[in-house]
Amino acid sequence: MAHSSKTPDDESGKDALDAALDWTKGSTAVATGALVFGVGLLNGSATYSGAIRACLMGAWLALGLAILSGLVAQSAIPPMIRAKNYDLEYPPFTWPARIHQLAWLAGVIFLAVALYHILFGTPPLDSLKVTSAQQAVAAALPSVPGGRKIQKMAVVELIKGADPSDSSLTRWHVQFLLAPATDKNAQDSVDVMIDPVSGIAMTVGGPR
């Protein structure tokens, strides 16, 4: 009966190295898909806040490093198998593999944080309901007291917060001057603030 020249240790070592190669190929493929997906989120038509852009940039860099280090780790395995070197701590394989794992994890975390804020945080500016002065005036008109005529439109302005790209800090301000009323206590102007995200208008101030 012929006996195999490979020892049980050789077989188990080769199996472990084959498994490492399969895992690295799979995780590199996932990193590639995630990078393509992440780049597609910033397609030029959507404007996100600085924090979301920073997360996406971090995801791109980390996933790009994961792909590069994964390919380097994969390229080290075939020569190891040919040389019957099944040491998973072999530096030409170990260090790229470790970098690949850490970069892959960081990229996934950055991308997950960006997706969370995109889905549940402040919506992109291109999805606002009120994006122009004309839309702001139309949203403010229902706030004019019934029976009162508008003498002139005094103010239409977009008030931005500290971060101009963060729509949650932005408000439209519309002010109407009203024609004189018989009631001396009636207000002579109406100030309306409009949330550009929801389109909800709210009258501010008291009688004038």
Image (cartoon, helix red, strand yellow):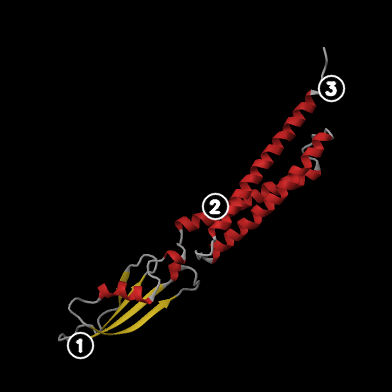
Residue found 56% across the figure and 63% down from its top:
53
The picture places residue 56, in percent across and down from the top left corner, at: 58, 59
Q: Earlier in the sequence, mark 1 or mark 2?
A: 2
Disc 1 marks a residue whose amino acid type is Pro
Say which element carries label 2: helix
Quarter placement of the C terminus: bottom left
Say which element carries label 1: loop
The picture places residue 104, in percent across and down from the top left corner, at: 64, 49
Residue 74 visible from this viewpoint: yes
Res 77 quadrant in image: top right
The picture places residue 96, in percent across and down from the top left corner, at: 75, 47
Q: Nearer the viewer, mark 3 or mark 1?
A: 3
Residue found 46% across the figure and 73% down from its top:
161
Disc 2 marks a residue whose amino acid type is Ala
Q: Mark 1 near mark 2, Cβ–Cβ under 8 Å? A: no
The picture places residue 184, in percent across and down from the top left corner, at: 17, 87
User: Mark on residue 138?
Assistant: none
The residue pinned by badge 1 equals 180
The residue pinned by badge 3 equals 5
**In the shown orientation, is residue 183 left or right of residue 73?**
left
Residue 85 visible from this viewpoint: no
Image label count: 3
Decide: few, some or many residues near mark 2? Use Cα within 10 Å; few <14, some 14-19, many ≥20: some
Residue 60's place in the image compared with 5, above or below, is below
The residue pinned by badge 2 equals 112
